[in-house]
Image (tube, rainbow, N blue to C red):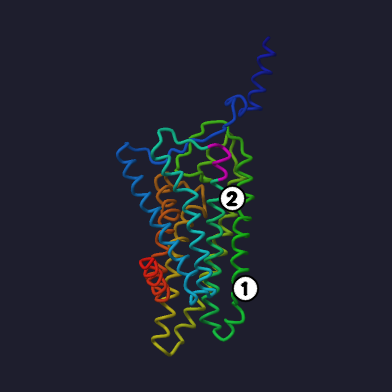
Amino acid sequence: MGMGIMMFEEEKMKNPVENNHSDPVNEFILLGFPCSWEIQILLFSFFFAIYVLTLTGNLCIISAVLWDDHLHTPMYILLANFSFLEIWYVTSTVPNMLANLLSEMSTISFDGCFLQFYFFFSMGTTETFFLSAMAFDRYLAVCRPLHYPTVMTVQRCIRIGAGCWVSGFSCFLLPVYLISQLPFCGPNTIDHFLCDPGPLMKLSCVPAPATETICAIYNSVLIFSTFLFITSSYTLLIRAVLRVPSAEGRRKAFSTCGSHLAVVSLFYGSIMVMYVSPTAGNSTGIQKIVTLFYSVMTPLFNPLIYSLRNKEMKKALRKLLMCGKMT
């Protein structure tokens, strides 16, 4: 009898996951923003307004590029792709977040959670590639103006854009696969408003230092490689602009580059805080605020930044508005 008890205890020690939690997790609870019902209604109204404005702003940029023949250039083709990406980027999280704000129990299925994880971070990765492509386009236009028409043709721009989409949606397959293979057997509450890798890995039944390290290295390489490419392009670009003898030429070049740099600063500043070292121990509240900033606010700011600082875009938007009024 005593021998049987000892063997049972040894078996428990060998399989702590199976003995502590009998059933695997088939859904997660997104805690979101735990607050009173009145505040949740205010948050719903605020985020709904931001979502509508984001869709409207980015759709206006896409429509202006499609409508105005003068904007059928590589710079604006990339910008239209970027705006299209922003629409789906914000749509991958905000509608689900809005629904959860109005529901008592905010659940998401296991497969739904990892689908959101994959699409959200794939589109974020695609955004880094598009920002790099846009920086390279501006570098060629300013630093190699004579070669620009032959190097950056519309066909080549379309191929670059397609490469950004394919690469962005291919890169995050490995992290999603690694995290999805972790054992999840309870608790199943994610203290976030989306399926973020940090909170997800904390719910694993067993420690996963190898997966955490791989994901941290993966994020760091992706973020810093694209960031260094962008900053290098703009460093060379600014040096070239400073050598332009015309004050008007310098002002125009800096105006265009300033829009791109503002978007780069907003996006990279926030994602570096979150994902360069995902186990850095940031408080949950700070994680939610930073994630809100780069996932909800930057898609709203981007069309404003590009339209307000670009004369050609403002002119195209005015023409689009006039056509809309006439119809």
Near mark 1 (Cα within 10 A), the count class, few <14, some 14-19 or many ≥20, is few
Near mark 2 (Cα within 10 A), the count class, few <14, some 14-19 or many ≥20, is many
| Rendering coords of residue 207 (x, y %) | 58, 38
**Most distant residue in the top direction:** 1
| Rendering coords of residue 75 (x, y %) | 51, 73
Task: Report the Cα–Cα distance between label 2 and label 1.
Answer: 35 Å
Which mark is on residue 155?
Answer: 1
Residue plotted at (52% across, 45% down):
198
**Most distant residue in the front direction:** 327
| Rendering coords of residue 227 (x, y %) | 53, 65
Q: Is residue 79 left or right of residue 43?
A: right
Towards the viewer: 72 or 283? 72
Towards the viewer: 217 or 310? 310
**Is residue 113 covered in magenta?**
yes
Amino acid residing under circle 2 = Cys
**Is residue 152 covered in magenta?**
no
Which mark is on residue 258?
Answer: none
| Rendering coords of residue 88 (x, y %) | 50, 54
Q: Which residues are magenta?
A: 109-115
Residue plotted at (45% across, 36% down):
106
**Most distant residue in the left direction:** 38
SS of the residue at dot 2?
helix
* Rendered-image quadrant of the C terminus: bottom left
* Rendered-image quadrant of the N terminus: top right
Q: State the residue position of label 2.
A: 215
SS assignment for the magenta stretch, majority: helix
**In the rendered view, would you say 246 is above or below 298?**
below
SS of the residue at dot 1?
helix
**Most distant residue in the bottom direction:** 245
Q: Earlier in the sequence, mark 2 or mark 1?
A: 1
